[in-house]
Every structure is written in structure tokens, then in C-alpha cells.
Amino acid sequence: MSGLLRPGPEGELGNAVDGYLLWHARVTEAEQRAREFVRPMDWLTTSQQAEIERYYVTDALKRARKDLERIAARCLDLRAEYEHRYRTLRRRCVGLALAVCAAATATVTLLLLF
């Protein structure tokens, strides 16, 4: 997304819009599937069909919410894991760079003394 939709360091507005659009797509999909599920049941009255559709949509959205919450939790876990690995790698790189600089300084100093 463009920088205009993602103000701040974390892009809260862009994430909110993405979340809204994702959820709206899930609702639309659940409603469509409910209509398709009830369509062959022509012996039901209109109110019975509507009730079954509502129940189907409610159940589908509960399941979708649980799935999205599980995915979001996993994303947070992965982010924490990668941040920890990045900090470890950064410490190693800085330590190696300092060791190389110290060795180079010591070598140059010894060469200049002799």
C-alpha cells in the first residue's frame, strides 16, 4: 500500500482497512454460501429458510473469527521470534566488527612500533 494509507511506524490505518475489507469479504462469502445451502430446500417456508441462513452465517463467522484470531496470534509469535533472532544476529555482527577493528588496530600499532 502507499505511504499515505500507512501513517506512523506500524501502519495502523492500513491494517485497519485491510482487516475491515477481509472481514467484509468473509461476511459476504458466508451469506452467499448460506443462500446456496438453503436454495435446494424448497420445502421450507421463507421464514425457515431465512432462519437457517442466519444460523449458517453466524456459525461461519464464528469459525472465521477463530481462524483469524489463531492466524493473528501465530503472526505475533513469529514476529517475536524473528525480532529475537535479528537482535542476536545484530549483536554477533557488531561484536565481529569490533573484533576485526581491534585486531586491525593492534596489527597497525605493532607494525608502527617495529
Image (cartoon, rainbow, N blue to C red):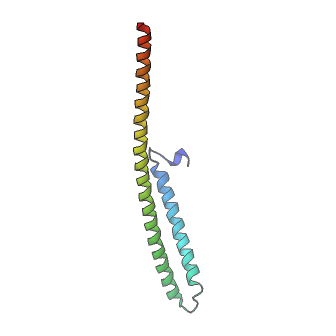
| Residue farthest to the bottom, as pictured | 43
Image quarter hosting the C terminus: top left
Of residue 17 and residue 22, the one placed in the foreground of this image is 22
Compared with 1, 111 (above or below) is above
Q: What residue lies at 43% left-to-right and 57% top-to-bottom?
A: 74
Coordinates of residue 69 in the picture (x, y in percent) = 42, 63
Coordinates of residue 62 in the picture (x, y in percent) = 44, 71
Q: Quadrant of residue 65?
A: bottom left
| Residue farthest to the front, as pictured | 114
Coordinates of residue 106 in the picture (x, y in percent) = 40, 17
Q: Quadrant of residue 92?
A: top left
Q: What residue lies at 56% left-to-right and 93% top-to-bottom?
A: 43
Q: How many dots with numbers?
A: 0
Of residue 8 and residue 30, the one placed in the foreground of this image is 30
Q: Quadrant of residue 83?
A: top left
Compared with 113, 71 (above or below) is below
